[in-house]
């Protein structure tokens, strides 16, 4: 059998589970909050057009509106100033093979349970590799924090000095790009950077370094606790928006049972 036939057979036989890593889009799902002098991310909105009634007797549908960066979403290189001139930097230009690939899950949930501002460092990555093997070229790396289990205000965790949530240190992102050549990095928080990432150098290093290198970001992921450290395959295809800087999307992972 061909590789695709083997995959289809394994799926139909229940030998591969498909894990949904996506939050449900609804008006109450939190979005990133920027200082008031900046433009703000729009929440998800849904308006009923008809529901088998006088507005449309045989059909039901809705109009929807939101930011490109609402809910579980994809960041393209053009989202950040460092990636503004990256070739094929918008979601409609990215080669589709980039949306499917192996995934490595680095579990930082124990650390983040003790420290809302935890930063993942290269030492954490090296310790993970000592146990699970080297991160392969072209892999997605997801930082598990169990932050997705938080609800409402606890998810953004806003204080007087802004949001507090975990993320990667600048040298961790550089390591993943320069030493491992990952395709992208994902988190369970509202952004790929730590909540206090504006105070790091460079500010918001995951965004600045990832997108400047032509890499991609995923945020607001969930169910990372259902994935193995290695061996899963990630599928993360954003909407094909002309010149889009990002997109809400359905993130799926295939895992052998």
Image: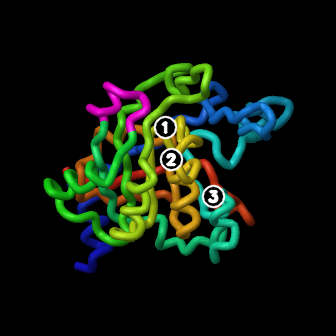
| Quadrant (top left/top right/bottom left/bottom right) for the N terminus | bottom left
Q: Is residue 112 above or below residue 172?
A: above
Is residue 213 magenta-colored? no
Residue occupying image coordinates x 64% and y 41%: 70
Give the x, y percent position of residue 241: 70, 61
74, above or below 212, in the image: above
Q: Is residue 61 visible?
A: no
Query: Mark number for residue 189?
Result: 1
**Overall secondary structure of the magenta stretch?**
helix
Instruction: Specify start and end residues of the magenta stretch as a single range.
Output: 109-118
**Dot 3: few (<14), some (14–19), or many (≥20) neighbours within 10 Å?**
some
Residue at x 14% of width, y 54% of height: 131
Question: CA gap, disc 3 to disc 1?
Answer: 21 Å
Mark number for residue 192? 2
**Image point 29% across, 73% down: which residue?**
5
Q: Residue furthest bottom?
A: 2
Q: Is residue 84 left or right of residue 21?
A: right
Circle 3 sits on which residue? 239
**Percent coordinates x, y for residue 192 in the rendering:** 50, 47
Q: CA distance from mark 2 to mark 1?
A: 7 Å
């Amino acid at each position: 059998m061909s590789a695709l036939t083997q995959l289809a057979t394994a799926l139909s036989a229940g030998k591969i589970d498909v894990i949904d890593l996506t939050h449900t889009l609804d008006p109450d799902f939190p979005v990133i909050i920027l200082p008031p002098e900046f433009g703000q991310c729009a929440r998800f909105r849904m308006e009923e057009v008809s529901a088998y009634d006088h507005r449309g007797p045989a059909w039901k549908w809705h109009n929807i509106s939101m930011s490109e960066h609402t809910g579980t979403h994809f960041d393209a290189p053009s989202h950040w100033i460092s990636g503004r001139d990256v070739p094929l930097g918008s979601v409609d230009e990215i080669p589709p093979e980039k949306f499917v690939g192996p995934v490595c899950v680095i579990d930082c949930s124990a650390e983040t349970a003790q420290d809302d501002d935890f930063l993942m460092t290269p030492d954490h990555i090296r310790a993970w590799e000592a146990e699970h093997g080297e991160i392969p070229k072209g892999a997605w790396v997801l930082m598990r924090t169990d932050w997705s289990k938080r609800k409402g205000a606890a998810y953004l965790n806003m204080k007087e000095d802004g949001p507090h949530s975990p993320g990667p240190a600048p040298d961790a992102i550089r390591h993943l790009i320069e030493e491992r050549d990952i395709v992208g990095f994902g988190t369970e928080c509202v952004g790929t950077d730590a909540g206090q990432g504006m105070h790091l150098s460079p500010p918001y290093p995951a965004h600045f370094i990832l997108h400047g290198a032509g890499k991609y970001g995923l945020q607001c992921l969930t169910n990372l606790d259902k994935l193995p450290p290695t061996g899963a395959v990630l599928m993360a295809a954003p909407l094909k928006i002309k010149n889009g800087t990002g997109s809400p999307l359905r993130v799926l992972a295939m895992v052998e049972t």
